[in-house]
Image (cartoon, rainbow, N blue to C red):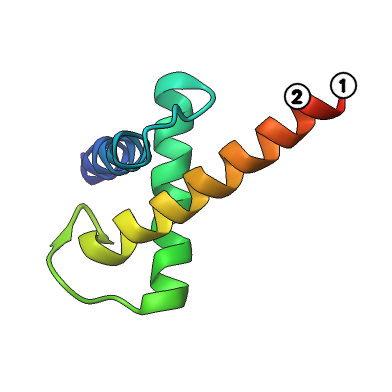
Amino acid sequence: MSWLWTIIVGGIIGWLAGVLTGRDVPGGIIGNIIAGFIGAWLGSLILGSFGPTVGGFALIPAIIGAVILVLIVSFVMRKMRHAS
């Protein structure tokens, strides 16, 4: 059951990153979950793990990492659209 909680928290982190940046994460719910997981990993690499932990994610670094990831993905997607 803990894996379900981890997936839900990862999806919320990805969704929150999209809301904070004003950009949609490609892939809908699955994209939000992936952005949450990768963002949490990226944030913990850059900032370590501090702050409250929910579902195995340190929330502050996870959200910051997910925001960075969403900005990078939206930049790359925009460049790919303009290139074609």
- Mark 1 to mark 2 CA distance (whole Å): 6 Å
Which class describes the residues within 10 Å of circle 1: few (<14), some (14-19), or many (20+)?
few
Which class describes the residues within 10 Å of circle 2: few (<14), some (14-19), or many (20+)?
few
The quadrant of the rendering that contains the C terminus is: top right
Q: Is residue 12 left or right of residue 45?
A: left
Q: Name the spot of residue 6 as percent of width and height, x first.
A: 28, 45
Above-or-below relation of 42 to 83: below
Q: Give the structural element (helix, strand or loop) at label 1.
A: loop
| Farthest residue, direction front | 82
75 or 35, which is in the foreground?
75
Looking at the rendered structure, which numbered label has been put on residue 81? 2
Tell me the residue at 37%/41% (across/down).
21
- Which residue type carries mark 1? Ser
- Which residue type carries mark 2? Arg
Q: Name the spot of residue 25 as percent of width and height, x first.
A: 47, 30
Looking at the rendered structure, which numbered label has been put on residue 84? 1
